[in-house]
Amino acid sequence: MNASRFWNWFVYPGALWIALLFAVPLFLVLALSFGHVDDLGRGVYGFQLTNYADVFNATYVPVLLRSVGYALITVILCLGIGYPAAYFIARFGGKYRYALVAALVIPFFVNYLVRTYAWVALLADEGLINNAIVDLGLTQAPIQMINTPFAVIGGLVYGYIIFMILPLYVSIERMDPSIVEAGKDLYGSPFQTFIHVTLPATQPGILAGSVLVFLPTVGDFVSAQLLGGPDTYMVGNLIQDQFFAASDWPFGSALTVVMMLFLAVWMVLYLRRATRGEAEVL
Amino acid sequence: MEQSEAIRIDGITKKFGDFVAVDNIDLEVSSGEFFSLLGPSGCGKTTMLRMLAGFEVPTSGSIVLNGEPVENVPPHKRNVNMVFQSYALFDHLDVQDNIAFGLKRRKVAKEEIGRRVGDALELVDLSTRATARPNELSGGQRQRVALARALVNKPQVLLLDEPLGALDLKLRRQMQVELKAIQREVGITFVYVTHDQEEALSMSDRIAVMSAGRVIQCASPEEVYEHPSEEFVAGFIGISNLLQGKVESRGQVRVGDVCLPVPDLDDSYSVGDSVQIAVRPEKVAVDEIDKPAYKIVADMFTVQGEIESMVYLGVGNQLTLRLSNGGRLVALEQATYRVQSHDQWKIGQPVKVGWHPEHCMVLK
């Protein structure tokens, strides 16, 4: 009894940490989202819903939709690129399996911002790729790559694909390889076996990876800021601008709260699915 | 049982790099036969089975299933089904959908799928668990689902890879009986891989005993047990007492300074050949030395010895005997009405040991 009471104390540092540095700021954001800006551009607490009305006005709805659209495309691309990679490493990597996983993870030791700058160097009009194709005479003028949705989504895929590959890898590695053989033994062609056996068996990894990529991608501002232009403006940029450029903290807070609620709905759906299916929650 | 040929294996070899897993095997399996591949782990029996299923392509040789060569036919186009050691059930499907999997891939009509799945569930006594998920089932039930999932397709040959290996002993015994009964009922050719000699002996019509990629002996359980062709077979199937000796004459082998009568040797043996004599422990009779013969009868060969150690097995005793000529024998004594608790053996007790000469197996 005393021993367990002793160990109970260990919960307080963590609880305090979360209360001070997570719950309190969150509450401040929530409170500020109902406030307004005074004449000097400072946020003032109050109670009004105008900020929330602004979030859903015609100027910003396309930004929200674009963010969700980019995030969905990013998830699909990550899945398309990540699944074969994870499958190959987990099933055929043999003794090089861990080395291959490490090779995938190591680039992510480099800060996301720095990696995105590297993409700027690659894709810019005077960048590596354009210089190369112009010098080789493939085109007369550089091809517009930067400031396009292609560059922003590419940057997002590059930035977050590891969060797709790792859960997929775990899921595929845990799968009993003999169920794939059983699928073929029961007259499934390789394609049918993949659809009816492998995909369902690795569904927990697909779900976990999709959520882990989708959540940070929707709110991302780095990729759109460095690789995009006005036409690729995402909600993350919008929020950032409210806090740093426009100095409209109450509106930025309202945007943040709406985003969080939107993401929380997905998170809850995922958790319910994952716990019901006894899937691993990553 | 019709005697048409279900499987013919001609000169099958499978190499993994330099390792020869299966070394030039020839086998024929009749239609409706319960055929076992028996051997220690690494003997190539599972590789042989996987070549029948189509998961491995032979390095050389041919496999003919019901008259059609299949070495290069992929698994999903072969009319054979497999029961996997791990069962390999699909956890995302319930029991009936697991069983229906093969029928659905073959585009069997929906009503027929329903009927056949129902029959298969009944066959394995799982009708009440049709909508359960595999992870809600016990080991024995999962095993039955795996069996039903394969049998429902009415394959020409059913391949079983140590299907009872994961079950506890009692359940395994029970499943052996059931498996044999199911095989009789459906009449499908079974090829059964196991390292458990008792399992192979109790269920099979014929057994191929394998070692190091080769078939050492292929015969009925009785033949393999009573007349093993080689020392390996004698040793692998049951405990055998092996005595080194030399052929003395057509009916005698000298072991140390004793001449043992043996069944008549054929012309392949000549005087002076080194041979081994094997005697099954349950064929060895042991009597107290200073009392009238109890189990040893007149035409037995007898030697003297003493009890070296004794293991109580419940159904009997396993005695290790040291013979007067220095040899050692194991005797398995049934706890019949003749063996009472008051005449238990004592360590070091001198005894008479005897066996019928025809129970001596002479091995080259």
Image (cartoon, helix red, strand yellow):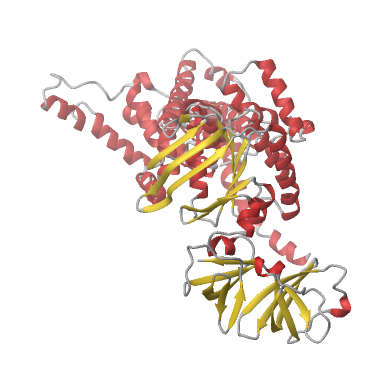
The answer to whether A38 is drawn above or below residue A205 in the figure is above
Identify the residue at horizontal 71%, vertical 68% (top origin): B283
The answer to whether B17 is drawn above or below residue B10 in the figure is below
Q: Nearer the viewer, residue B4 or A223?
A: B4
* Quadrant in the picture for the N terminus of chain A: bottom right
- Left or right: residue B4 versus residue A153 is right
Q: In the picture, residue A118 is in which quadrant?
A: top left
Q: Nearer the viewer, residue A256 or B62?
A: B62
- Left or right: residue B300 versus residue A213 is right
* Quadrant in the picture for the C terminus of chain A: top right
The answer to whether B227 is drawn above or below residue A222 in the figure is below
Identify the residue at horizontal 39%, vertical 49% (top origin): B16
Q: Position of residue A129 (x, y in %)?
A: 20, 30
- Left or right: residue B169 versus residue B150 is right
Q: Position of residue B183 (x, y in %)?
A: 69, 37
The answer to whether B280 is drawn above or below residue B256 in the figure is above
